[in-house]
Amino acid sequence: MEKWWRDEVIYQIYPMSFCDTNGDGVGDIPGIISKLDYLKSLGVGVLWLSPVYRSPNEDNGYDISDYLDIDPRYGTLADMDRLIAEAKARGIRIIMDLVVNHTSSEHEWFQKSRERIEPYTDYYIWRKGKGKRKPNNWSGFFGGSVWEYDDLRQEYYLHLFAKGQPDLNYYNPVVIAEVKKLMRFWLDRGVSGFRCDVINILYKDSLKNGRPLPALCGAEHYLSTDGTHRILQELRRDVLSQYDCFTVGECVLITPKVAKDLTHENRGKLDMVFSFEHMDADNILIKWFHRRFRPKRLYKAFAKWQKELEWNTIYLENHDQPRSVSRFGASGEYYDRSCKALAVLLMTLRGTPFVFQGEELGMTNFDFTSMDQIMDVESHNVDKVLKKMGFSAKVRWRKMRYASRDNARTPMQWNGRDGAGFTSGTPWLGINSNHVTINAEDEDKNPDSVLNFYRRLTAFRNESEALKSGSFRCTIMNNRVFAFERRVKDDALGIAVNLSPKTVNLPSVGKVLLSNTGREVMDCQLQPYEAVIMQR
Ligand code: ISL
Ligand code: CA
């Protein structure tokens, strides 16, 4: 089948924060439909929707209580069908989030499993403790133990994420059959694939105690196991291969070697993966221990993955990461230019680019002032853990401001008025006060805005074979500049990006096809935060 998704720019929608049409403060599917023309104007070909299934919302929809229905806050199945059809009419495809490492604890399967009602008894990973001790020493992604005691069943259940997210038991073939069923349900409705949530941790090899370091305690027992590869093969064989669709697997703690394996024809068979190495350019292993951003770390991680993988996803933001301009860009004088420089990086590397809602406007980290403005379950759990470790309130808050996932989740800034054009009611999460200047309505009118630069860039990419499928060759990489060449036959482009506040000398001259400074000729110097695409 044709790998059409390689040619598309993909846009991630976080439905809760995108557009609210009924004033309840929560974004909804009719809201997404109302913005399809805007999305079309951005030149994107695929929308990835973060979960819109029924959910009690402990982890904003990543805790699903019914895979075969739309949560009433977002609308109805009929709304979803209409979205798929209206998008299709504009040449836009929709992919959904497939969250099947765990369900919500409110899912009927779990409720029946607690009572040992067949066939649900073994849908989850239940264990007796050892006396008063938990079944093993593993720690979870959101901090603390992965085991929770259930009084009804009188056993512990495993949850690698929040308490309300029990892990499914992939030793049970009936669980895999359920997953196939729900995938078909959505593919038959017309979705074009899945972003597969934490897909490389499905199958736990054993429940033995874990080594405490260097990764998450216990991770060596479930990361990218052969069992997971077998499951992915089965899903490909029995479901995915029968549709014109693709998968992108979110894969935690992977190396290029493992990524190759997970996308290999005879192994995991995913079409692409999200890797995380470049997300560590401003931290030490985990985001809560951030350090000064060094551009070279970002460039190096990108260059490494470009070299090692035949194809990869390219992204700078998603709903779990702070805003890219607040991490890798500038504030003040060079804010605008740095947003555009990051956009050039995103759109010119080899791979499928993913834009996260608001990134195209230059949205920044939130401006909250206290913990009670934060809704994210991870932030609250981590704050507790950090407190136990002895970090002061001031230090903890500094970490939250820098790394909380809510930085990316504040409502979309559609205009500069009250409610930011996102809602007429009270938004579920605070709106950044900078929406008075950073917003779609004003940027639409300004030809030099970040938004209009994005439009020019996606249009450029959509027309350029060198950018869509050309080879990658790094030509310069230092602590200021990243320059590389993209080439198909004799169609070649040179790209240079400067993510530093200094002017740098560059050994290149020639015609500039697109830049974030308006320059038309390259004269051996790159301005602060300047980015150019040159004819080679
Ligand atoms: O967000 C993270 C760090 O802040 C990651 O560790 C994240 O938890 C990990 O990438 C898995 O993320 C995915 O699954 C989670 C969900 O909370 C995230 O939103 C989702 O992207 C559990 O379903
Ligand atoms: Ca709503």
Image: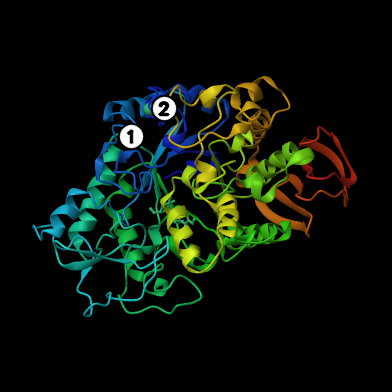
Residue 307 location, x and y as percent?
Answer: 63, 61
Q: Is residue 450 visible?
A: yes
Q: Which residue is mark 2?
A: 88
Q: Amino acid at mark 2?
A: Lys
Lateral position of residue 454 relative to residue 6, left or right: right
Q: Amino acid at mark 1?
A: Gly
Residue 461 location, x and y as percent?
Answer: 64, 37
Q: Nearer the viewer, residue 473 or 281?
A: 281
Q: Residue at (38%, 39%) from the top-left corner?
A: 192
User: Which quadrant contains ligand 1?
Assistant: bottom left
Q: Which residue is mark 1?
A: 190
Q: Nearer the viewer, residue 16 or 149?
A: 149
Q: Is mark 2 within 8 Å of ligand 2?
A: no
Residue 442 location, x and y as percent?
Answer: 65, 22
Circle 1 sits in a helix, a strand or a loop, which is it?
loop
Q: Residue at (42%, 55%) from the top-left corner?
A: 270
Q: Is residue 268 visible?
A: no
Q: Quadrant of the C terminus?
A: top right
